[in-house]
């Protein structure tokens, strides 16, 4: 006695012929739906000898006016995978297209729940040895249906290029038979590393770009992730280009290889030379600061002080805060 597996399902041969007949009957329903003149078919396992040269069988007319294929014997087929070729012929002796069905013949053995005993995977290309020569997936249990999570070492991906890849896998039962190979698509992306921005350099329109690393530069420290980190640096007055509609060019260098980024630019800047700004007038308030220039002490007079606390902030020419005080009276020194 033998068993047969169709699409990884196992049944007795005694019932399998009925199972095949039911499938083929369903197939013929589609083949002969447009004609009632089909009355003959032929089939062959594994090697199709050509039209009219295979095993001839007469079709049986069913009650619903469809044609049914008689029982096909699997006697003599060896244990393993086979292909059933089958086609029909009409009354004008014209043959249909050939249909093929994959089947598997297995030895008669009771299938217990520990039927899956091994699993393996490979990436992109099948190993030269075929089944059993891919990378083993350890199984902690043996069953007829297994959901298994496994980790692929990072060393496996080290030699793969960044981009899309395919992981293939299959399982083996205790009879030594392998399943069909399943597949899953993955994308390999570059992870964050220890690189960081360590320097920026800049120049203004009207000045030549004299090359990477040769322009005005500032040492800074920006570490990944770069999407959230930022840093501020000041450009000294003697490195500014004054005027209207000035363009600032800037680029950054990373720490590991010393590679510079592309040069970005910010146009439309109005850069004005610094000058004394010790008095101003607004609608709400007016104040004066003297003497100008100042050396030791600065006097601040508020003409319309409203008794609210105000803040006095003194910065240098590059924006660094040198002193900060509260002003609580209309005259402050």
Image (tube, rainbow, N blue to C red):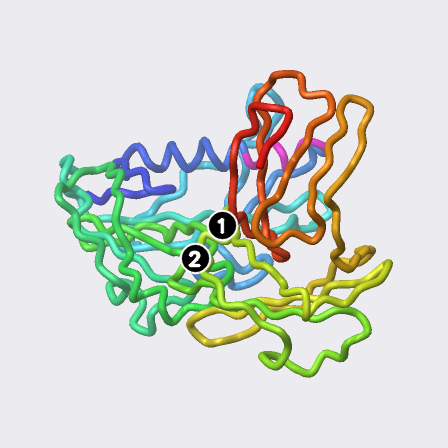
Tell me the SS state at disc 2: loop
Question: Which residue sits at x=42%, y=55%?
Answer: 45
Image location (x, y in percent) of residue 41: 56, 45
Outermost residue, top side: 307
Q: Residues within 10 Å of mark 1 (few under 14, many from 20)?
A: few
Which residue is under mark 1? 229
State left or right for residue 266 relative to residue 313.
right
**Observer able to see residue 311:** yes
Image location (x, y in percent) of residue 287: 73, 32
Q: Which mark is residue 279?
A: none
Question: Which residue sits at x=73%, y=36%?
Answer: 288
**Observer able to see residue 79:** no
Tell me the SS state at disc 1: loop
The residue lying toward the viewer, choosing from 309 and 189, is 309
Image location (x, y in percent) of residue 33: 68, 31
Q: Earlier in the sequence, mark 2 or mark 1?
A: 2
Q: In which quarter of the image is the N terminus?
A: top left
State left or right for residue 81 relative to residue 226.
left
Magenta: main secondary structure: helix
Image location (x, y in percent) of residue 195: 42, 65
Q: Is residue 212 above or below residue 290?
A: below
The residue lying toward the viewer, choosing from 113 and 38, is 113
Q: In which quarter of the image is the C terminus?
A: top right
Spatial separation of the CA atoms under disc 2 and disc 1: 7 Å
Q: Give the range drawn in magenta.
A: 27-34
Question: Which residue sits at x=35%, y=44%?
Answer: 73
Question: Which residue sits at x=39%, y=56%?
Answer: 167
Q: Residues within 10 Å of mark 2 (few under 14, many from 20)?
A: some
Callout 2–callout 1 Cβ contact below 8 Å: yes
Q: In this view, does 29 lie above or below 83?
A: above
Which residue is under mark 2? 223
């Amino acid at each position: 006695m033998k068993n047969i597996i169709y699409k990884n399902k196992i049944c007795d041969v005694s019932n399998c012929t009925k199972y095949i007949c039911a499938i083929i009957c369903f197939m013929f329903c589609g083949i002969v739906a447009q004609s009632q003149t089909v009355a003959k078919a032929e089939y062959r396992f594994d090697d199709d000898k050509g039209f009219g040269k295979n095993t001839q069988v007469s079709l049986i007319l069913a009650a619903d006016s469809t044609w049914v294929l008689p029982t096909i014997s699997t006697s003599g087929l060896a244990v393993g995978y086979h292909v059933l070729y089958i086609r029909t012929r009409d009354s004008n002796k014209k043959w249909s297209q050939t249909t093929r069905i994959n089947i598997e013949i297995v030895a008669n053995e009771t299938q217990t729940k520990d039927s899956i005993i091994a699993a393996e995977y490979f990436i992109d290309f099948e190993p030269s040895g075929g089944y059993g020569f891919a990378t083993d997936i350890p199984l902690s249990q043996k069953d007829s249906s297994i959901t298994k999570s496994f980790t692929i070492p990072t060393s496996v991906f080290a030699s793969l290029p960044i981009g899309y890849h395919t992981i293939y896998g299959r399982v083996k039962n205790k009879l030594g038979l392998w399943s069909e190979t399943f597949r899953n698509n993955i994308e390999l992306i570059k992870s964050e590393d220890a690189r960081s921005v360590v320097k920026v350099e800049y120049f203004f329109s009207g000045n030549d770009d004299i090359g990477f690393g040769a322009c005005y530069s500032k040492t800074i420290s920006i570490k990944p992730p770069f999407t959230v980190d930022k840093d501020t640096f000041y450009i000294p007055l003697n490195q500014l280009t004054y005027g209207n509609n000035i363009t600032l060019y800037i680029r950054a260098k990373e720490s590991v290889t010393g590679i510079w980024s592309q040069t970005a630019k910010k146009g439309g800047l109005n850069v004005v030379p610094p000058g004394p700004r010790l008095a101003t007038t607004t609608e709400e308030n007016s104040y004066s600061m003297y003497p100008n220039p100042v050396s030791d002490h600065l006097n601040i007079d508020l003409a319309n002080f409203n008794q609210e606390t105000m803040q006095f902030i003194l910065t240098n020419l590059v924006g660094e805060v040198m002193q900060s005080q509260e002003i609580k009276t209309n005259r402050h020194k």
